[in-house]
Image (cartoon, rainbow, N blue to C red):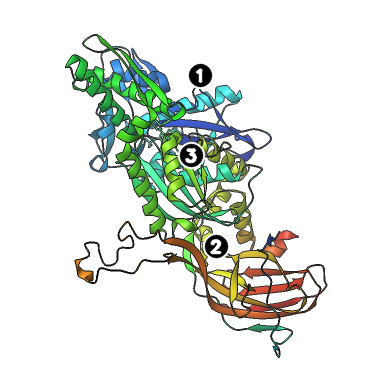
Amino acid sequence: RYREASNLPLPVLPEGWAGEKDFKTTGRLSAATQRSIEPVGPHFLAHARRARHKRTFSEDDR
Amino acid sequence: MAAEGASATASAPGERIAIGISFGNSNSSIAITSVDDKAEVIANEDGDRQIPSILSYVDGEEYNGQQAKQQLIRNSNNTVAYFRDFLGQDFKSIDPTHCHASAHPQEHESTIAFTIQDKEGDEKSTVTISEIATRQFRRLKQSATDFSGKEVNSAVITIPTNFNEKQKAALTKSASDAGLEVLQLIHEPIAALLAYDARPESKVEDKNVVVADLGGTRSDVAVIASRGGMYTILATAHDYEYAGVHLDKVLQDHFAKEFIKWNSIDPRENARSLAKLKLEAEATKKALSIGTNANFSVESLAEGIDFASTINRLRYETIARKVFDGFNRLIEGVVKKAGLDVLEIDEVILSGGTSHTPKIASNMRSIFPETTTVLAPSTTPTAINPSELQARGAALQASLIQEYESEDIEQSTHPAVTTVKHLTNAIGVLAISGDPKQGIFTPVISAETAVPARRTIHISVPKEGGDVLVKIVEGGSHIKVSKPDPKPKTNGNKDSDDSDEDSEEDSDDEPEEQRERVWKVGNVLAEAAIRDTKKGSKIEVMINVANDLGVTITAREVGAKGGVRGNLSPP
Ligand SMILES: Nc1ncnc2c1ncn2[C@@H]1O[C@H](COP(=O)(O)OP(=O)(O)OP(=O)(O)O)[C@@H](O)[C@H]1O
Ligand SMILES: [Mg+2]
């Protein structure tokens, strides 16, 4: 499943850009907030199942 | 079948017949899901889908629902009404206001009870709040059982978001004493949201939702982050000053005054007259939700005098303005409390009986921008009956979990599973518009998304294709306020200005400010290069955030092999 972004395009790769295997990390995520998700609905049940079996999304997809 | 009064113990999943119950101070309703997974609210033996949460006793016989409500006129002492919020409370902390014209709650041992004549003969009994609620649940269970032809033995029940552990325990015990195993208690606004999201035409989207549950004696509002079908409550507010009964009161006073004008008798001074006035005011109010005119007519309102009058909707909306303004303030307040702006709300769900009122929906239409969907009968023809949302949501949840072992349900609802990290900022990709140096944030994962989370977007390459840059960044949503062509201030002496310095809304003659939602680009997280893309092709970007906030990014040209993949360590 994917979402179609608005029709603005990606930028052209700047001259001289370099990264190992064409990838470069420049930062990390900001700290997160602890909150409670509501244990309701089909998507929560899928989440709980993954959490209980310590499975990832892609393992769950299979 | 369980013996009378026996508690329902956890039954084996295979033996469950489960329903959804919404149990309010004013009304209860019950819903079941049919084989095609659609929830439907079912009528009781009187044909009512909204069953007044009232019990009344005449010569030892028990009446419930609409029949019990009628008893408020002649038999108010033996009629118990508006009791749900007393469950699990100390006598000192309850508000008995709404019980003035029915059996009064009183302190009894460590709980609350009513003294009513509920058996044949003159003997009175003291019936605890727990037992009253059990009797109400028995009636609901019986109605559902009669409807489905099989004994209903379990339920998902909706509760307000501010119910504490004692209240939850008391409610569970009352239901269980009526022979209903409580599979789960779920929050009322979440049940309403689930009822909408379960419709086949609704898409799983990331959206900020306001659920305004406007009932009879209370109004409750919640702001919910709905992310990939998972729900997180960001803020709530509860109000007991502006609710359905306050709209009734406005009409009551209006017609009482008219009656006084003709007859010089105040029907509010006699208990029976007042009860009649109240019931008819409510009926008139409901009629005004459908028609633009409504009748008010009571036989023998006071001292044997009949009374009939009419009112139009505009007049009603004018005299009830204070109450409507109260709803508006409550709803605007909780959006602020959630740290959001009205521009950031995607959907407003009007729930609860009072939400049938067209004026409330039109007020929402003017408070929220056009981009916000307002789900109410008068604004959206396909809206679900607001009185049925909670029971439906509860029934849907019941059908989802009734096959589970009780321990599994308990484990899944445990804080160890439900307390999780939520993203502070959105994560997205930079696109470009006119100025190639100016990146435009394109969100991929919204703020307040619970982790782990995974989202994928497709985004265009420049016209000519070639080598492109995928820049992954954090973004924050902001409200940009601008005043088109502001008039220069001619008043040199600023201090003489009588409005507050920080007040946004200065004088009336200034052009109206424009407010728009914009993204501010924050932290740059990663960059990836996709080379040799074809003209007119698209890039698929997948962002996967793990439990520990480590991020995996993959980007590839749609339809092409390979692609780029990289990881960000957790913060
Ligand atoms: N069509 C209608 N138009 C306007 N108001 C209505 C309509 N139908 C029901 N109501 C009002 O809705 C209120 C009851 O709402 P609801 O059934 O959601 O209550 P509840 O959740 O049981 O109440 P409480 O807030 O007391 O716990 C009553 O004041 C009733 O008059
Ligand atoms: Mg309610």
**Same chain letter for marks 1 and 2:** yes
Circle number at residue B277: none
The mark closer to the camera, 1 or 2, is: 2
Label 1 or label 2, whichever comes before in sequence order: 1
Label 3 or label 1, whichever comes before in sequence order: 1
Classify residue B433 by image quadrant: bottom right
Which chain does the numbered disc 3 sit on?
B
Q: Find residue B477 and report its horizontal and vertical position in percent.
A: 50, 67
Which one is in front, B278 or B21?
A: B278
Question: Residue visible at 38% across and 52% down?
Answer: B332
Q: Is residue B17 visible?
A: no
Rounded to the nearest angstrom, the CA distance separating label 3 from label 2 is: 27 Å
Left/right of residue B5 with respect to residue B60 in the rendered view: right
Disc 2 within 8 angstroms of ligand 2 (CB): no
Q: Find residue B503 and report its horizontal and vertical position in percent.
A: 30, 63
Q: Residues within 10 Å of mark 2 (few under 14, many from 20)?
A: many
- The amino acid type found where label 1 is placed reads Glu
CB atoms at circles 3 and 1 under 8 Å apart? Answer: no
- The amino acid type found where label 2 is placed reads Thr
Residue lying farthest to the left in this orientation: B264
Which chain does the numbered disc 2 sit on?
B
Which chain does the numbered disc 1 sit on?
B
Q: Is residue B275 above or below residue B543?
A: above
The mark closer to the camera, 3 or 2, is: 2
- Disc 2 target residue: B449
Circle number at residue B157: 3
Q: Find residue B463 and report its horizontal and vertical position in percent.
A: 75, 72
- Disc 1 target residue: B45
Q: Is residue B428 visible?
A: yes
Residue lying farthest to the front in this orientation: B490
Question: Residue visible at 68% across and 34% down?
Answer: B35
Rounded to the nearest angstrom, the CA distance separating label 3 from label 1 is: 21 Å
